[in-house]
Image (tube, rainbow, N blue to C red):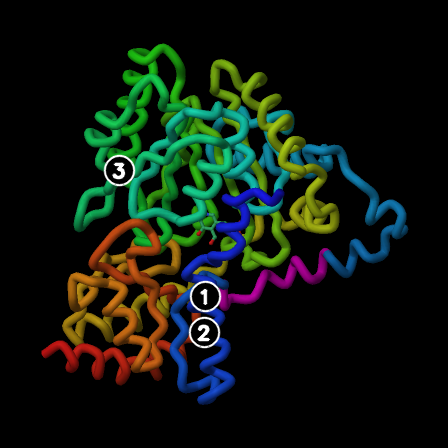
Amino acid sequence: MIDERMYDLGNAPSAIRELFAYGLKRKAEIGEDKVFDYSIGNPSVPAPQKVADTIEELMKLPPVELHAYSPAAGIPAVRQTIADSIARRYGIPAKAGRVYMTVGAAASIAISLGAVTNAGDEVIVPSPYFPEYKVWIETMGCSIVEVPTQVPSFQLDVEAMGAAINEKTAAVIINSPNNPVGAVYTRENLEALAAMLEERGKEIGHPIYLISDEPYREITYGAEVPYVPTLYKHTIVCYSYSKSLSLPGERIGYIYVSNLMDNAKEVYTAVSGAGRALGFICTAVLFQRVMEKCVNEPSDVEAYRANRELLTKGLSELGYEFVEPDGAFYLWVRALEPDDEAFCEKAKAHELLLVPATCFKSHGWVRISYCVSADVIKRSMPAFKALMEEYK
Ligand code: PLP
């Protein structure tokens, strides 16, 4: 007998992926340059040259050595390089023994949830949020508790999050810089969250783990992105090179269990166990080795910065309302009618592929993923104008 829940998940692909697939079909029908696909977050900036150079260099290794299994948590030297980089950049005593190499942020979050939750627990997620969180939380037999962020700043509503905590609360997931909104949580906001979690954890008699999903950490436009483990000791960082180094298809990232956590050793052991249980062991060895050399490569955000200027200037001139993005490469724009799905359907008629807020458990907004070429943004402005005129 097949698992009904898994069947349902397989049978209902994510709405974002469906829109992306529609875009490909539409481009084949009417021409690549006629469709303005703002659906998914596939970086348009090439990976650093050093990645290609390192791969070339690695190809000189004897194949048996190059392609061999690594230990389950990853190659020790790679974990050491990452721990050293964390320690140097954020001033905390990060150790290789708390770094677990994974298949991107997706696996990191699923593993972390597996490590710190038990069936029946609750996990708090500020909304709007990356839709896969719900899938991973429910896969662990837990319930998602959605707590809306503050509108229009989209900072965490710490008071409401505190009110949602009870004995069953095992963890909170945060994502800053944020997908889908582009907000970066301020130091003040994160400090308030940390103080609240510390206090509420004491009241309910167990720590509340903070899972910090950070694929966009490096993609910012001047805002400070505080390192969460320096503010709250029960933090597990889920990092990925998908966006920072434009390597989404290589599926490489890591989990860092903060060395400042009281029970770091136990949590890390549970992370290793969850990695094993979920089959996420010994992640892609070639890309582990690439990361050993490229971990300190800077992210190239200039193209995203230019796109952000182009898009925000163009849309504000046309009268659209949006959240000024401090990070990531998403613009959160107010739909021109309360029903964001209906609005996106109307946008589609102008060949504009926008993702409705409903996909992120919010309403009345749409997400524009602007990691596209600048040319797409320039050419799409008449379509945004025509869409606005429809509502006048
Ligand atoms: N978390 C967020 C907020 C994301 O936007 C994404 C990907 O778009 C992921 C996690 C998954 O990242 P990865 O490709 O590293 O698995």
**Residue that mark 3 sits on:** 147
Residue at the spot x=50%, y=37% of the render? 139
Say which quarter of the image contains residue 282. Answer: top right
Q: Residues within 10 Å of mark 2 (few under 14, many from 20)?
A: some
**Sooner in the amino-acid sequence: mark 3 or mark 2:** 2
Quadrant assignment for the N terminus:
top right
Q: Which residues are magenta?
A: 43-54
For residue 246, above or below residue 230: below
**Residue that mark 2 sits on:** 22
Name the outermost residue toward the left: 392
- Cα–Cα span, label 3 and label 2: 31 Å
- Residue 181: percent from left, percent from top: 30, 53
Residue at the spot x=88%, y=52% of the render? 63
The residue closer to the viewer here, 163 or 89, is 163
Name the outermost residue toward the bottom: 30
Q: Amino acid at mark 3?
A: Val
